[in-house]
Image (cartoon, grey):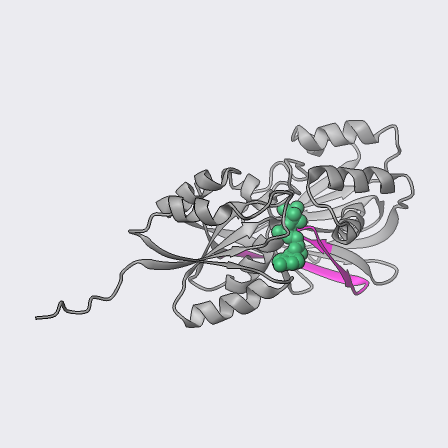
């Protein structure tokens, strides 16, 4: 008599690889995933994106096929695409951090080594984290206006990726960048007019590459950390840079900080905004809010 057909109880997991993220080639990742994933728990499939925005389309099709686990293989832009596709669902995101900055993975202490990141996925410890919305667009690490948005815009046009290209763009543009005037309203009550080098709303503590703009950010507290940096000159820049990387920027006199559920920023005209380092031109008025624990994610 033939064996009865048994339905697999393995969890279907899709690895979505962004081939252009970071500086490393992605050929070896296929072997690393296949050799490391726990095949008793998971039934893996691996797909490469072909263009920006692909992940959203792929994920909506795969949810219909019964997939619940989606792994972003790339940097914060890839994490943003995968995360945005599954917010407020019972789907779960994993990360293999192969990008340039890897801010969310670093915040969550997901190992930067691919095999070790997959071992974290195998353990399947799931937590819910907050995400932000900037004029309706989700972000998981940071969003902002000013110099960081300007650099995101310039970096997106660069052919090369990676930390050194990022630093090259930042150093080249620092001298010519002109701080701008903003009206800021925090939680509907606190109003201020500022001239700022940048304004960042942080869900996670860092931009990526361990550059901590909001060292005390808690990704589960239902609040955004606001950082308003006053205009700085060339002489101040090295010390400010050092404070970013030593988690002490919140002690600097050039930074005003606070926590909020809602921030409204008004500028003179429409201009660039970044969400997780991805640049986009937005209206002069930007509304930034936070959704408490709206994304399920695998953490160490
Ligand atoms: N196949 C593809 N071809 C071109 N661009 C892609 C493709 N797949 C995704 N993208 C886009 O590539 C951009 C960069 O990806 P990602 O942010 O993951 O890498 P990164 O910039 O090197 O890392 P990080 O954001 O951590 O600094 C994102 O805007 C993403 O949407």
How far across and down, in percent of the image, does residue 179 sit?
A: 88, 46
Q: Is residue 236 above or below residue 131?
A: above
The reply to whether residue 289 is in sight is no
- For the image, the number of numbered tags is 0
In the foreground, 139 or 102: 102
In the foreground, 171 or 182: 171
The quarter of the image holding the C terminus is top left
How far across and down, in percent of the image, does residue 170 sit?
A: 80, 40
Q: Is residue 110 above or below residue 87?
A: above
How far across and down, in percent of the image, does residue 87 sit?
A: 51, 62
> What's the residue at 82%, 31% (across, down)?
237
**In this picture, which residue range is highlighted in magenta?**
274-294
> What's the residue at 72%, 54% (across, down)?
274
Q: Is residue 258 above or below residue 46?
A: above
Ligand 1 located in image quadrant: bottom right
In the rendered image, the residue lying farthest to the left is 1
Find residue 218 and report its image quarter. Answer: top right
Q: Which secondary structure is most common in the magenta stretch?
A: strand
> What's the residue at 12%, 70% (across, down)?
2
The reply to whether residue 175 is in sight is yes
> What's the residue at 65%, 39% (across, down)?
214
| Residue 273, magenta (yes or no) | no
| Residue 288, magenta (yes or no) | yes
């Amino acid at each position: 008599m033939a064996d009865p057909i048994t339905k697999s109880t393995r969890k279907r997991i899709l690895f979505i690889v962004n081939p252009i993220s970071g500086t490393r080639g992605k050929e070896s990742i296929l072997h690393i995933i296949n050799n490391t994933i726990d095949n008793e728990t998971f039934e893996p499939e691996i797909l490469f994106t072909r263009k920006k925005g692909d992940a959203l389309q792929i994920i909506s099709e795969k949810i219909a096929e019964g997939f619940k686990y989606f792994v972003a293989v790339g940097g914060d832009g890839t994490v943003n695409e995968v995360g945005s596709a599954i917010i407020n669902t019972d789907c779960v995101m994993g990360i293999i951090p192969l990008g340039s900055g890897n801010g969310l993975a670093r915040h969550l202490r997901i190992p930067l080594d691919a095999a070790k990141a997959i071992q974290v996925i195998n353990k399947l410890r799931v937590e819910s984290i907050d995400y932000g919305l900037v004029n309706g667009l989700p972000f998981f690490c940071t969003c902002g206006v000013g110099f960081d948005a300007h650099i995101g815009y310039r970096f997106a046009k660069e052919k090369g990726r990676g930390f050194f290209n990022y630093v090259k763009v930042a150093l080249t543009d620092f001298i010519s960048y002109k701080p701008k005037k903003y009206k800021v309203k925090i939680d509907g009550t606190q109003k201020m007019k500022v001239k700022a080098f940048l304004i960042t709303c942080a869900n996670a503590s860092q931009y990526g590459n361990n550059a901590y703009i909001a060292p005390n950010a808690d990704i589960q507290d239902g609040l955004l950390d606001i950082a308003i940096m006053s205009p700085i000159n060339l002489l101040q820049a090295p010390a400010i840079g050092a404070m970013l990387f030593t988690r002490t920027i919140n002690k600097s006199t050039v930074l005003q900080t606070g926590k909020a559920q809602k921030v409204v920023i008004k500028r003179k005209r429409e201009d660039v905004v970044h969400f997780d380092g991805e640049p986009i031109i937005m209206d002069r008025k930007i509304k930034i809010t936070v959704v408490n624990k709206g994304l399920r994610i695998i953490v160490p």
